[in-house]
Amino acid sequence: MIARRGVLVAGAIGGTALVLPSSNGAVALPNGTVVAPGAGSVGKFPVPTLDPTTIPKYVTDLVIPPVMPMARHSQRHDIDTYVIGVRQFSQQVLPPTLPSTTVWGYGSLGDNNTFNYPSFTIEARVDQPVRVTWVNDLVDDQGRFLPHLLTVDPTLHWANPPGGNTGRDSRPTFTETPPPYDGPVPIVTHLHGGHSTEESDGYAEAWYLPCANNIPPGFATVGSFYNEFREEFADEHGLKWEPGTATFQYANRQRAATLWFHDHTLGMTRLNVYAGPAGFYLLRGGECDLPKGALPGPAPAFGDPPGTRYHEIPLAIQDRSFNSDGSLFYPTSREFFDGFPGPYIPTTDVSPYWNPEFFANTMVVNGRTWPKLEVEPRRYRLRFLNGCNARFLILKIADNPTARPAQSAVPFWQIGNEGGFLPAPVQLEQLLLANAERADVIVDFTGIPEGTELYLINEGPDAPFGGRGVPFDAADPDTTGQVMKFVVGPLVSKDKSVPPDKLKLPKIRPLGSASVTRRLSLNEVTSTNVPPVLPDTPVETLLGTVDSAGNPVLLGWADPVTENPRLNATETWELYNFTADAHPIHIHEVAFEVVNRQPFNGPPVPPESWERGFKDTVIAYPGEITRVKATFDHPGRFVWHCHIVEHEDNEMMRPYQIGGRHKKDH
């Protein structure tokens, strides 16, 4: 396994990057200096200019996302129809005493007031189809494309619109280190957790540019799979996608659950999602839901009058860094990560702008830094999402925001995860959430005196998560170790929900036995150009298979498909993690069971209590085999990948094919 040398984190005081301790301690910089763990600043590359300790905490009320309005004119009454675009706008993410921030976000094209970061929530019902026309509206008021807010690295295997139809979705070659890409931005939206057909899944090579009036000549305007999926959708539903759009239909034939949607463009997901486009998709009803009134409510509904009190609240937790003008900060150079100043591609194999991970220095909940929420002394249903790029979260509710280790003041009762309700409620003192994981929990404030202040804190690391038994420093208690504040107010409504320890959750039908077992590998690749590159410098992350001798076979995005389940087959996938980091692995289209985990040299252990039932994202720990089982019941082309999106964007994603081979539109 590869021992990471250290990670520069945007969590430092005064906008200075610090070197956090890693498994092998000190870090050698390119100038020969050795920096001890926790030592001071390095380099003169761009860093965040807004000191996170100067941002007032708990002065802004939590924003509870309203419900996304449906399209005003729909020809089908049996389908919930939406027209949702991605636009650029200014939002007060920081407290009002500080500048606003330019972000991207989803909104209904019929109502400019609905554009928000994060998105308004799509409310869906089991077995009631939802049809969304996703519009790339990243243009200015003159119809010209808007360049990216962040630095796009064109040396990765990415969408590559400048490559034209023959060079799109590729890793370009260069004779000198290229500048960042500043052209029109491709997008494609994935419903994470959706049980979707291939043309509606948001495949990474089915992206599309905005319908701008100044697209450069020769640019590809759509990805390699876009035209094929457009024809499939037209054949199935009688509707052909317009330029700059894609229409997806979600049948919602799955268990009631907390889903979310976000961009999934090849090689650009880390940047597009960091800019803002993401939102909740809450699927309700069916035999795997609870009757109305059993759980705390209400949740937001369309047309609610101002001032409505909600007792079911979705919470999207993300980390972000800012500049003093309010703009988002994301690294503009690889030098930010480990101090390596180049030379980059093509002289070496190090990409100039991609960072292997990024940990920002503030915590943002529902689009606001360190918000507060007044709660009644009663039960609440909180739907947590870890929407961070790379940061694992370990959440607690404590009565002191900075004391470490913190004592839990109020427990969580987890009742659901990504795949819906658990077999039974689980009482927890803390929540471990990897990137893209969700936790449906009940928090009971009953009996807590009015005026009490409680804090949602994070004890996960400001660095890659090494997994169980690996010591780490908890997040900075003054910044990223705090998330939001709860202030207990008066009781103004009667709580008729069932106490969590008395809840009877819907029954779960387990999957049958698996007919195939696949051995798959998680890998990190370091530079072969030593010197001038320092030893153990990571240059890409890869998935792959495992050979008969137990060795990893490394495969990139463009390598032939190796995972090809038969239609309706149930398979066990064994994930061998040969890296030093824990990776959240997401498999599109399916809800899987976590079977067990097994150290490379040890016996298997059962899944955690909160991992029972069905999931779509699982933590694969270093030096372990993580086994999951799924039934693959939609034919077509999908992907599986690490949801540390910096990893996903640089080869830690693979296509897989259910039910036969697939053509590609080249």
Image (spheres, rainbow, N blue to C red):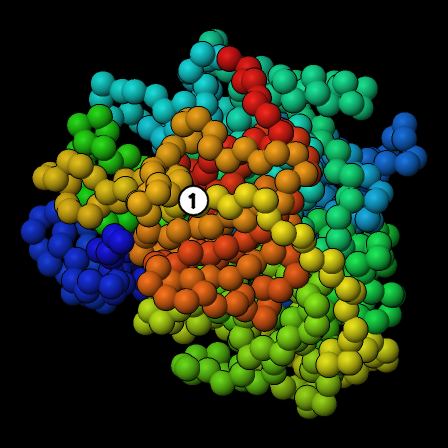
- Residue 453 rendering spot, x and y as whole percentages: 60, 82
| Residue 158 can be seen, yes or no | no
Q: Which sits in the foreground, 430 or 35? A: 430
Residue at the image position 50 percent from the left and 24 percent from the top: 184
Residue at the image position 42 percent from the left and 31 percent from the top: 557
Say what amino acid the circle numbered 1 marks: Leu
Q: Is mark 1 on a helix, strand or loop?
A: strand
- The residue at which mark 1 appears reads as 520
- Residue 578 rendering spot, x and y as whole percentages: 33, 51
As drawn, the residue found furthest toward the left would be 32
Above or below: residue 491 compared with residue 342:
below
Number of numbered discs overlaid on the protein picture: 1
- Residue 1 rendering spot, x and y as whole percentages: 27, 53
Q: Which sits in the foreground, 90 or 367? A: 367
Is 10 on the left or on the right of 346, as rendered?
right
Above or below: residue 470 compared with residue 517:
below
Residue at the image position 67 percent from the left and 52 percent from the top: 512
As drawn, the residue found furthest toward the top would be 217
Toward which corner of the image does residue 397 lie, by quadrant?
A: bottom right
Q: Which sits in the foreground, 308 or 405? A: 405
Residue at the image position 55 percent from the left and 43 percent from the top: 516
Is 138 on the left or on the right of 495, as rendered?
left
Is 339 on the left or on the right of 132, as rendered?
left
Toward which corner of the image does residue 331 lie, by quadrant?
A: top left
Q: What crowding class fits label 1: few (fewer than 14 Cα within 10 Å), some (14-19), or many (20 or more)? A: many
